[in-house]
Every structure is written in structure tokens, then in C-alpha cells.
Amino acid sequence: MPPVVDDPLFFLDYDGTLAPIVDDPEAAVPHPEAPDLLRELEAHYPLWIVTGRDLQALSSFLDRPYRAIGLHGAQEGIVGRETNNLMSDAAAEALRRLRTSVPSIEGLRVEEKDQSFAVHYRDVKDEPGIRARLDEWLADLPEVLDAIWGKKVVELRPAGLTKGTAVHRIAEAHPDRVPVYLGDDVTDEDAFAALQDMNREAVTIKIGGDDTRAAARLDGPDAVMDYLHRYL
Ligand SMILES: [Mg+2]
């Protein structure tokens, strides 16, 4: 079990950490223990939810206005309430332009995310073919954007804004706390790296078996609930 610290500053990823991974992202309800647990943790400690989703989309799953980082670090705000988009006008404009040129291919699905978007190709039959088409489409990607390849999805994001930059900023504002970060995504690695580079005590926990920079591991949302209960 990862260490339990006295004065945590929680960063909790949503999908795969607080909610089991399901095929349909619209059906990703929190673990049954999560709503009560989050309410109690937030009453005692500073807590941020971290997600690649748009924060407005998260409000259908979380019943309270938690502080949160959305769009993998490009958004900060309150779930279901006000959000602050951190991306530059140049990145927003480049995203709008790219959105109009997504290849038109059967099975390709675009997920709209406030000012960004992701292209899912899970349902496209010819996988090597679609990868080549998408590589070609993204060949002249402007510097203000990053293309992040995930599991049968490519997501367009403003460059230079990651879960790591967000966590760094928030951790700096809480010098007397120990950041405790739990996440399962490739993009959570930016946060693990940022916390380790800050040269201060931190608890970094990877959910699942993928390669990681995190110092500890838990194997899924059930184990996450057991670990977080130890703070109450
Ligand atoms: Mg996740």
C-alpha cells in the first residue's frame, strides 16, 4: 500500500481512478463508494479532480462543485460551475481550423470538448490505413498544438499545458501540503514528473500496470477507495 501522509493535497484523476473504465465514456459513473468518500475528503483536505474531459461534462457524474483541472491541464475551474480556459487565442484558432479538416471516413467519430476535440477510430475497419490518413492530416500541425495519441484515439491539445503544469501551479500555492496524485493515464505521467521535479515530498500513485514514473501503484478503483479511506 502506498504511504499515507498527514497533510495531503489531493489530485485525483477521474476515469480509471475514481470511476471504472467502461466502453462508453458517457456511462462512466463513479465507483459506488466515491461520492461519500470525496465529500468527506474534501471536508478535511484540499482536493482537485483531474481529467482529460471538459469540466462541464464531468458535472453529470459528480454531485458536488469540486475544484478541478480539465482538458488534461488546459482548463481549471469548478465542476458544473465556472471554468477558466487557459489556452492561448492562437491555439484556440488553430484548433477551430483543424476541426474543419478532419478526414471524412466511415466509423471515425469526433468527440467535441468545449474548445478542443478528439478523433476516435475504434470503429474504423482498416486500422493501418486510418493511422496513415490521420498522420497525413496532422503532418503540418501548428506549433501551438500537440497531438496526443491514446488507445484508438488522437486528441488535439494546446501545446505546453499539461496535467503537469496545472499540478505544479497548484502545488506551489500549497507549500505546507504533501501532494498526493493518483492517475491511470499516459497524461498523468506529466503530473508525476512535475511533482518529482519539484524536489519536495509527494506521493505519486499509478493506477494499473502500465509503465510509469510514479513511485507506487494500485491496481484499480477498488484499491483506490481502500487507500483513500485511510485518510478518514
Ligand atoms: Mg484516467
Image: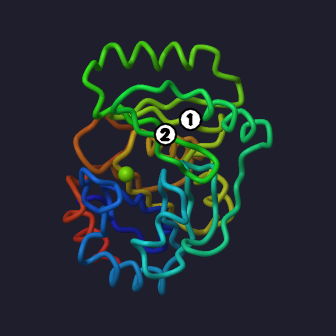
Q: Residue 120 in the image: x percent, y percent?
A: 39, 36
Task: Tell me the colour scheme of the image.
Answer: rainbow
* Disc 2 + disc 1, Cβ < 8 Å: yes
- Kindly identify the amino acid type of the residue bearing the numbered disc 2: Ala
8 is higher (above) or lower (below) than 150: below
Seen in the image, is 210 located left or right of residue 139? left
Q: Circle 2 is placed at which residue position?
A: 118
Q: The residue under label 1 is which amino acid type?
A: Leu
Query: Residue at horizontal 24%, vertical 62%?
Result: 221
Determine if residue 4 is in view. yes
Q: In which quarter of the image is the C terminus?
A: bottom left
State the SS at label 2. Answer: strand
Report the disc number at residue 156. Answer: 1
The answer to whether residue 97 is left or right of residue 139 is right
Q: Where is residue 156 in the image (x, y as percent from the top left)?
A: 56, 35
Task: Using the image as rendered, state which of residue 207 and residue 28 is in the foreground.
Answer: 28
The yes-or-no answer for disc 2 within 8 Å of ligand 1 is no
Measured along the vertical axis of the image, is residue 182 above or below residue 229? above
| SS label for mark 1 | strand
Residue 61 percent location from the top left of the image: 39, 71
Task: Tell me the quarter of the image containing the N terminus.
Answer: bottom left
Residue located at (72% from left, 46% from top): 87
